Image: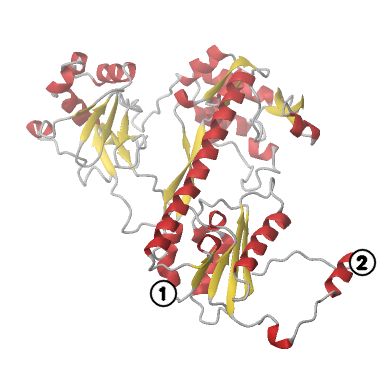
């Protein structure tokens, strides 16, 4: 793909273009030589000018290859972070695909700056592919082509990769620290869409004088007269003990437009047809309805995907941060839709589902059992008339099964309680865990910030200061297998909760 800045030469520009200095033919620059593909990248489209970013990278690349060849193809990514793997960048992915084409039309790749193109060990992963297809890489930092057999070049590339990662880490830390202070001390709205039930209103000029001169304004939340009553209704019904499903069902029966229907412009990827359980849960768990600004509830992690040849790929996954890591404003900064006392009370409301036989199933250790393989909280699962817990490691029906898929982990509640009850090392400091009642054990674990972390072989109790491994032979005394049996891995669908 060729990217250029269109320009029609008129007036002064046309005159300057015509003033060509004549030189003897034998001293003219040769137009032939190495054919290059230029690669460039810019991180954002809102805060960077494409024309200037493209120009300086292209000019630097042209200066590097002067008298050696010319650029015949161009690949320029816009709005893509350097942390994104090459196969997942639109233009970089096209460049990788072009490498395998014998008629690609270029013999080398040139970039204007290492940090514009690579991050960490990305170049080390790309090197075998370039050597296989006999394509050179030219960098300004090496003053020409990279020699992947030269130890000095390899050491320099490692240093540049570390510097690229350090630059991102430093910028991220500074930004996070600044935004945390702005949320806690100033209660500032830090961007993003307003929660359902609120709307954004002007809050005056930006406190940064330079930004204020540019016309930037602050914003704050105000109750939306149309949707705010629905939020208050949802919290009130939950406090009455109603289930999330019944609340969503009543909203749909009453014809109340769901959040994605109210704001279609920013929810075009959603159907906007009806209220979902997850929508009601998101409202009930959002602390910003108390009138305080809350930031850093989520973080973005890079999860590994299946390799593209020898090149690692990643996807960004949203994870919820523990409440201890939230940045909560010290003051109420916008009108609340629910009091703090009612919000906290709502978080403690639990409506246990009723099984097909009419019984209420109880999971004493729910929220306290974590998967030691992927770190997720294990799901409560009813197996053969017993409470159990399982983890599918993020797999669902939308992903195809493959050889790399991790084996589902199943654990029974009675196994966990038995191991905890008979672990002598644990009882030296936590004697109350000798109790055989799961409810007593669960209450003690929750009160003392203790969790259970399990995989297929090892089960441990983690405290804030120590990790205590549960003896693996305890359940054998009771004839209980270490993990769920094959029969337990196919529970009956009815009664599943």
154 and 406: which is toward the camera: 154
Q: Is residue 337 left or right of residue 225?
A: left
- Alpha-carbon neighbours of circle 2 within 10 Å: few (<14), some, or many (≥20)? few
Quarter in which the C terminus is drawn? top left
- Residue 307 seen anywhere in this rendered image of the structure: no
Q: How busy is the neighbourhood of tag 1: few (under 14 within 10 Å), some, or many (20 plus)?
A: few
Instruction: Please count the marks in the image.
Output: 2
Q: Is residue 339 left or right of residue 25?
A: left
For marks 1 and 2 on the same chain, the one whose residue lies earlier in the sequence: 2
Can residue 289 be seen here? The reply is yes
Q: Which color scheme does this rendered protein use?
A: secondary structure
Q: Secondary structure at mark 2?
A: loop
Q: Residue at x 71, y 23 (%)?
A: 223
The one of 82 and 139 positioned closer to us in this rendering: 139
Name above or below for residue 220 compared with residue 152: above
Q: Nearer the viewer, residue 2 or 213?
A: 213
Badge 1 is on which residue? Answer: 132
**Marking on residue 63:** none
Q: Quadrant where the N terminus lies?
A: bottom right
Measured as percent of width and height from the top left, residue 181 is found at 58, 24
Image quarter of residue 389: top left
Position of residue 55 measured from the top left corner of the image (x, y, whole percent): 70, 60
The residue that disc 2 covers is: 11
Tell which residue pokes out farthest to the top in this image. 341
Q: Residue furthest left?
A: 477
**Rendered image quadrant of residue 428:** top left
Q: Residue at x 62, y 48 (%)?
A: 269
- Please indicate whether residue 377 sits to the left or right of residue 263 in the image: left
Q: Secondary structure at mark 1?
A: helix
**CA distance for labels 1 and 2:** 49 Å
């Amino acid at each position: 793909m060729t990217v250029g800045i269109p320009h029609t030469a008129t007036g002064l520009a046309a005159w300057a273009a015509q003033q060509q200095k004549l030189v003897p033919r034998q001293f003219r620059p040769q137009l032939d030589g190495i054919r290059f593909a230029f690669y460039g990248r810019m991180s954002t489209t809102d805060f960077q000018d494409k024309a200037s970013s493209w120009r300086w990278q292209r000019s630097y690349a042209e200066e590097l290859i002067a008298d050696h060849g010319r650029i015949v193809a161009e690949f320029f990514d816009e709005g893509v972070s350097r942390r994104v793997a090459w196969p997942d960048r639109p233009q970089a992915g096209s460049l990788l695909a072009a490498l395998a084409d014998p008629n690609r039309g270029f013999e080398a790749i040139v970039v204007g700056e290492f940090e514009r193109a690579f991050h960490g060990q990305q170049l080390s992963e790309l090197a075998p592919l370039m050597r296989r297809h006999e394509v050179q890489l030219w960098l300004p930092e090496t003053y020409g082509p990279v020699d992947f057999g030269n130890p000095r070049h390899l050491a320099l590339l490692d240093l540049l990769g570390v510097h690229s990662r350090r630059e991102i880490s430093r910028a991220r830390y500074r930004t996070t620290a600044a935004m945390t202070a702005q949320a806690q001390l100033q209660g500032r709205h830090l961007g993003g869409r307003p929660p359902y039930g609120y709307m954004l209103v002007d809050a005056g000029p930006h406190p940064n004088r330079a930004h204020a001169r540019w016309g930037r304004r602050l914003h704050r939340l105000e109750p939306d007269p149309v949707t705010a009553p629905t939020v208050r209704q949802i919290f009130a019904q939950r406090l009455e003990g109603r289930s999330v499903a019944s609340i969503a069902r009543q909203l749909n029966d009453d014809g109340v437009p769901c959040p994605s229907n109210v704001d279609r412009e920013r929810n075009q990827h959603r159907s906007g047809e009806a209220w979902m359980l997850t929508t009601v849960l998101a409202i009930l768990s959002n602390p910003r309805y108390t009138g305080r600004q809350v930031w850093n509830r989520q973080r973005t992690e890079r999860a590994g995907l299946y390799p593209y040849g020898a090149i690692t790929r990643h996807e960004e996954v949203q994870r919820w941060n523990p409440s201890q890591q939230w940045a909560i404003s010290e003051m109420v900064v916008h009108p609340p839709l629910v009091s703090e006392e009612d919000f906290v009370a709502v978080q403690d409301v639990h409506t246990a589902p009723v099984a097909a036989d009419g019984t209420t199933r109880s999971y004493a250790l729910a929220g306290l059992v974590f998967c030691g393989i992927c770190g997720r909280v294990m799901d409560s699962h009813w197996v053969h008339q017993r409470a159990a817990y399982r983890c599918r490691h993020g797999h669902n029906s939308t992903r195809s099964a493959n050889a790399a898929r991790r084996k589902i982990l199943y654990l029974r509640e009675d196994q966990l309680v038995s191991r905890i009850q008979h672990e002598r090392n644990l009882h030296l400091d936590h004697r109350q865990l000798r109790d055989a009642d799961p409810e007593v054990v669960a209450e003690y674990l929750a009160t003392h910030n203790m969790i259970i972390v399990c995989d297929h072989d090892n089960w441990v109790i983690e405290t804030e200061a120590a990790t205590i491994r549960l003896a693996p032979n305890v359940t054998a005394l009771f004839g209980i297998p270490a993990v769920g049996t094959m029969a337990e891995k196919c529970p009956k669908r009815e009664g599943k909760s």
